[in-house]
Amino acid sequence: MNKIKISSELFQADVNCEQIVWLGGIDPESPPDSIKDWFDDGLLDWLDAENDDALLLFLDSQMYPGRMGYLVCVSWRVPFNFRFDDEGRPASWSTGGRSRVKVFHGPEIEGCLDAAVIWARECFEKESAKANGVTAIGSKAPAGAP
């Protein structure tokens, strides 16, 4: 793991790593409160939230050697107050106040963090496009459109 490279990418994407949980180190019958909270809050969106046993079944499936992965919880500060250059690219913006939280699952921490950086960059692109009035790639929203 290249910690300097990962740290740099997380910093550039404005991603904070909130918590990392190794799934091989927990008891599926009594998972940590943070994992239960993530499930209840819908952050484990790949699990069926309607099924109360979905979390237990998922954790139980991770207990086999070679399958024990990680859950990585990250947050990303939502940008606002964009200023754009002459070509319509974001030149500056503010952050603070609102954050988005997402939990990634994978066999390695690095893969989860890489996915988090990609997610944050996609979110940034959507927020800057929305602030610039772009509804689709290359098209501006009509005047007066939300």
Image: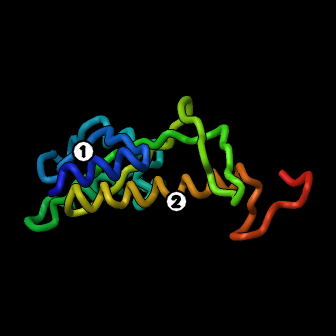
User: Can you tell which quarter of the image residue 112 is in?
Assistant: bottom left
Residue lying at 13% horizontally and 53% vertically, measured from the top left = 24
Q: Residue furthest right?
A: 144
- Which label lies toward us, 1 or 2? 2
Q: Nearer the viewer, residue 36 or 21?
A: 21
Residue lying at 67% horizontally and 38% vertically, measured from the top left = 81
Q: Quadrant of the N terminus?
A: bottom left
Pinpoint residue 19: horizontal percent, then vertical percent.
28, 40
Residue lying at 64% horizontally and 52% vertically, measured from the top left = 128
Q: Is residue 71 above or below residue 75?
A: below
Res. 20 mark: 1
Q: Which residue is mark 2?
A: 122
The amino acid type found where label 2 is placed reads Glu
Q: Nearer the viewer, residue 52 or 91?
A: 91
The amino acid type found where label 1 is placed reads Ile
User: Can you tell which quarter of the image residue 88 is in?
Assistant: bottom right
